[in-house]
Image: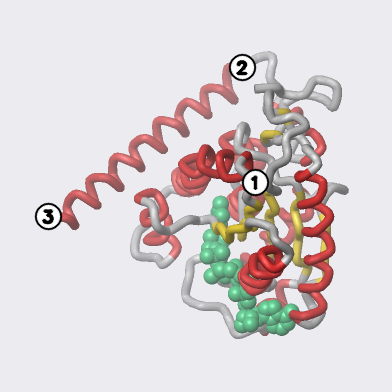
Amino acid sequence: MIYGSCITASKSLIFRALVLQKSLNSQVKFSSKWSPKKVRMESNLNGCIEGSKKESRGALIVIEGLDRSGKTSQCSRLVPFLEGQGVSAELWRFPDRTTNVGQTISAYLTNTSQLDDHTIHLLFSANRWEKRSLMETKLKTGTTLIVDRYSYSGVAFSSAKGLDIEWCKAPEIGLLAPDVVIYLGISPEKAAERGGYGGERYEKLEFQKKVADCYKVLRDDSWKVVDACQSIEDVEKQLQEIVTDCVAECRKGKPLSTLWSRQTHLEKDVI
Ligand code: Z5A
Ligand code: MG
């Protein structure tokens, strides 16, 4: 009975994702004023959230990188570090496999279900959208979020499969923008040597090389790139410095903003 309702919930989610996909397709096709080239991912082109200006808040810190670059190891170290500094901090990760959407994603990643590439992309995005308001509440009430993968993983992995990068970015527009993106840099070959890949769908060297190329396209000057081939402790020290500065900036009232502006530097999205 429970199994049956889970399947029904998954089908309904997939149906909703397909409807969203269809509506995105028509948006891209029919909106004459909007050129896909104008959709930007750079953190410095994000829209501000009205009312959050000059208010002390937590920082949204995103850690990105190839598989086995050490994201989870470093995120798990950052939270106790911040707590030791008297900062309220939580560890978050995407995909969040605990929700209904997350369980559908998990089944896909473990190869127990098959989904169209566009559909799974929208589900990854939906998994972030279902957490957006809680993230905003946490940040506004002073909790710093250390996030293991975010929208950039979504765009890098789906565009590595051959999906149009602008189409991949579109459903991420309006999600909260990170205050800093830390990229753990490592070659796919070196990463593969670490503990070996598991059995999940994307854990293959050839695919990881494509993902690395897509991350290069997404990266901008605002990203902090840290050499992930150093010892865990050395990487940790560098991350601690970046995170400490970022938390201080947000405490002073850096405005919360959203991903990512469709316009130029001068025409920021304000919601
Ligand atoms: N995905 C997507 O397609 N779309 C999306 O929107 C999102 C994700 C959000 C699940 O991710 C998959 O979903 C992922 C992207 C896709 N694709 N794959 N494959 P996940 O985050 O759940 O994956 P994971 O299981 O956590 O693995 P990971 O992220 O690849 O690993 P990691 O977190 O970067 O590394 P780690 O677990 O911290 O470390 C790996 C090993 O290396 C471990 O033995 C460590 O002890 C060792 N390690 C770590 N750092 C070092 C250093 N500095 N030196 C030596 N050894 C080290
Ligand atoms: Mg991980």
Say if 175 sits above or below 218 in the image: above
Dot 1 amino acid type: Gly
Say if 170 sits above or below 122 in the image: above
Q: Earlier in the sequence, mark 3 or mark 2?
A: 3
Disc assigned to residue 1: 3
Question: Residue 154 placed where, x, y %?
Answer: 59, 50
Sort mark 3 into few (<14), some (14-19) or many (20+) by Cα contacts within 10 Å: few
Identify the image quadrant of the N terminus.
bottom left
Q: Earlier in the sequence, mark 1 or mark 2?
A: 2
Q: Residue at x 69, y 40 (%)?
A: 177
Q: Residue at x 51, y 42 (%)?
A: 134
Label 3, label 2: how many angstroms apart (C-alpha)? 44 Å
Question: Residue 74 placed where, x, y %?
Answer: 68, 71
Count of numbered labels shown in the rendering: 3
Is residue 71 at all visible to an observer of this figure? no
Label 1, label 2: how many angstroms apart (C-alpha)? 39 Å
Q: Are marks 1 and 3 in contact (CB under 8 Å)?
A: no
Q: Report the side of 98 relative to 262 (left or right).
A: left
Q: Looking at this rendering, what residue extends furthest in the top direction?
A: 32
Callout 1 secondary element: loop
Q: Report the side of 238 relative to 160 (left or right).
A: right
Q: Which residue is mark 1?
A: 142
Sort mark 1 into few (<14), some (14-19) or many (20+) by Cα contacts within 10 Å: some
Q: Which residue is mark 2?
A: 31
Q: Are marks 1 and 2 in contact (CB under 8 Å)?
A: no
Determine the image quadrant of residue 69: bottom right
Disc assigned to residue 173: none
Sort mark 2 into few (<14), some (14-19) or many (20+) by Cα contacts within 10 Å: few
